[in-house]
Structure formats: structure tokens, C-alpha cells
Image: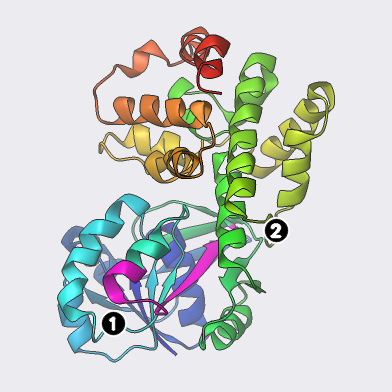
Amino acid sequence: MKFLFFGAGAIGAYVGGSLACDGHAVEYVERPEAAEILRREGIALTAAGQIHRPPAPGVWIRAADALQAGPYDLAVFALKSYDTAAVVDTLVEWKDRLPPALCLQNGVENEAALEQAFGRGGVIAGTVTSAVGRGRTGSAVLERKRGIGIADGHPLSRPLAAALERAGLNARLYPSAAAMKWSKLLTNLVANASAAILGMPPAALYADPRLFAIEREMLRECLRVMRRAGVGLTDLPGTPVRALAFAAERLPASVARPLLLRAVGGGRGGKMPSLYLDLQSGRGRSEVAWLNGAVARSGRRWNTATPVNRILAEILLRLTEGREAWEHYRDKPENLLSALSPARIGAEA
């Protein structure tokens, strides 16, 4: 198969590089500075201490040029969610040449945005659960192999899953795209926004009973929205989402906290989460609007209160955009707890 990847960050490099190592043709559309790195250094995949270098990929700066040089069997969106709108704008006039698209982006709203721009039936939902470390453009470090989920139902879903499986990506088909994407969103929420705001490692966050209570309510809000919207839970490759939900909703805090603490520590160790890295980069952009913000928007749609998710998203966006000083919250749990006080939350419940 021939793939056109939008984005050569950690996920784009990992999935595209793995396909290229298995003999597929892989090309990338990237920004000029990133494209130059790709042309000069190629793709580098590190797994189990070994570096794999697939054949040098085709690299494009303009999507229009890539599409004119096609055709491709599949486009793959491996971008940060905040980059979707800008890329869609460059593609609209070329949508007749755009092949079906696999969306590997975080959140639950990108597929709908792509379908609105390019037409219904042309988008396949996907999600990567393997832990892949960031590096330079075109570089990926496989830290923990779990797998990749692909929504069934599209004519390309099964051949795509087979190709990903042969490339060693542990692909699994899912009958419900919504259940797959929302279940991944639930895992993306864990020890992410709060850890970013406080500048605290996830394990330290979950070790504090007060902060754990906030984290737990955040997950419960997401689960309530899912039920109200009629979206089910599903386990993802290497990721027991149902057990996470059960611990968050059903177990006493005295039991749930040590269990989830071990899960967070085992999953990330001392690493900081993605929203912290977005904030620390100073680029002024954050995926929190597509994570906690998406829960809050869906809560409004389904008349379900989501104050914790809403407030976390609002705070982190203010910090990311420089409208509030990070020092007000960094290593100061009391200030975050005050912003998320029971009285303020209860007023919306």
C-alpha cells in the first residue's frame, strides 16, 4: 500500500516507519523546517535498544504537490489535534484527490471535522495505545508496545489492519468507532491536565488523596457523559479500560487510589504527560481543548455537568496562552484545589 502521512512526530514516525520497514511506500507532508530534517536524517525507530531505519521517505511541504503526485491508498492524520483545522484548510480544494483517511489523533472530534470537510464515509477512526516517546522530527522511541485500534466497517479497515499487524503494530478491529475513541479519551485524561497545571509527576499527583479525588471525579464525569450519549466502554490493545472505569466509579477510594497509583506509575513511571510537554514547550498550544474540553462540550450537549473537566481545561488554556502565570499553580496544589472547590463544582451539579 501507499500511504501519505500528515505529521512525522512520534506517532507518525512510529506507524509510518513501521509500515515502511515492512515494504510499504510511505510519504510525509510536513512544515518546511521539519521536512528538511526528514530529508536529511530520514526516519529512526528505536525499539528494545535497537535503531531501525526504513528507506528514506518521500517528503512534501505542500499537500497539494503531494496529492498531485499521487495517487495514494490511504492518508494518515497523525497530527496534534490543534493542527487539524489548518491542514484541512489546505486540503479542501484538493479533496477530490484525497484518498480515504485514517485518523490517529487524540480526542473524539477530529473524525467529524474531517468528514465535514471531505465527505462522509471517507474517514477511518484509529487510535494508538503503544507508548511512543518524542524525539526530533521523524524519530520515535517505542517505550511500551500495546497496539493500535482500527474502526471496522470501512472497505479498507480489514486490509489496513492486516497491513498494520504484519508491520508488527498489534492491530485490532473495533465494531464501534465511538466506543474505541471515547475509551482512549478516558485514558488520555488520567493524570494529564492536573499534572501539567501543577508541574507534578503523575505518581506524585495520585499519591495525594485530595488530588486523587479531583482526578477521580474528572473520570466519573467523562463516564457519565459517555452513558448519556449512549457510548460504550471497550478495552483497547494492552489497555484495560473497563478496569480503569470500574476502579474510578465503584471501588472505595482507599482501594482505588493505590490500584490506580500503581497503574499510573507502571504506565508512565516518572515521565511527565503530554499536556505538560505542550505547556512547557512555550508554543502557546495545547490539546487540552480536545481532551478535557471535549468532555465539557459533550456534557453541555447531553445536559450532563462536567465542572472538573471544564475548569481544568480553562485553567490549562489560560496558562498555555500566557493569560495566567504558571507560577500561580506550579507545585501549589492548594491553589488548584481552591479553583476546584466543592462549592464551585456543586453549583453546577
Residue type at mark 2 is Thr
Does the magenta-highlighted stretch encompass residue 121? Answer: yes
Instruction: Please give left or right for residue 66 compared with residue 126 in the image.
Output: left
Residue positioned 51% across, 16% down in the render:
347
Asked whether the residues under the numbered discs 1 and 2 touch, taking CB atoms below 8 Å apart as contact, a structural biologist would say no
237 within the magenta span: no
Q: Secondary structure at mark 1?
A: loop
Residue 224 badge: none
Q: Which residue is mark 2?
A: 234
Q: Which residue is pictured at 18% across the width and 64% down the height?
A: 89
How packed mark 2 is, by other alpha carbons closer than 10 Å (few <14, some 14-19, many 20 or more), is: some
Task: Point out residue 264 in the picture as x, y percentages from the top left corner.
Answer: 67, 37
Q: Quadrant of residue 92?
A: bottom left
- Depth check: 10 or 207 in front? 207
Q: Is residue 204 in view?
A: no
Dividing the picture into quarters, in which one does residue 136 lie? bottom left
Q: CA distance from mark 1 to mark 2?
A: 31 Å
Q: Which residue is mark 1?
A: 98
Q: Would residue 188 appear left or right of 319 to someone viewing this image?
A: right
Instruction: Give the x, y percent position of residue 189.
Output: 55, 40
Quarter of the picture containing the C terminus is: top right
Comes first in the chain, label 1 or label 2: 1
Residue kind at label 1, given as amino acid type: Leu
Dividing the image into 4 quarters, which one contains the N terminus?
Answer: bottom left
Find residue 16 and report its image quarter. bottom left
Total marks placed: 2
Which region of the structure is painted magenta?
115-130
Q: Residue furthest front?
A: 303
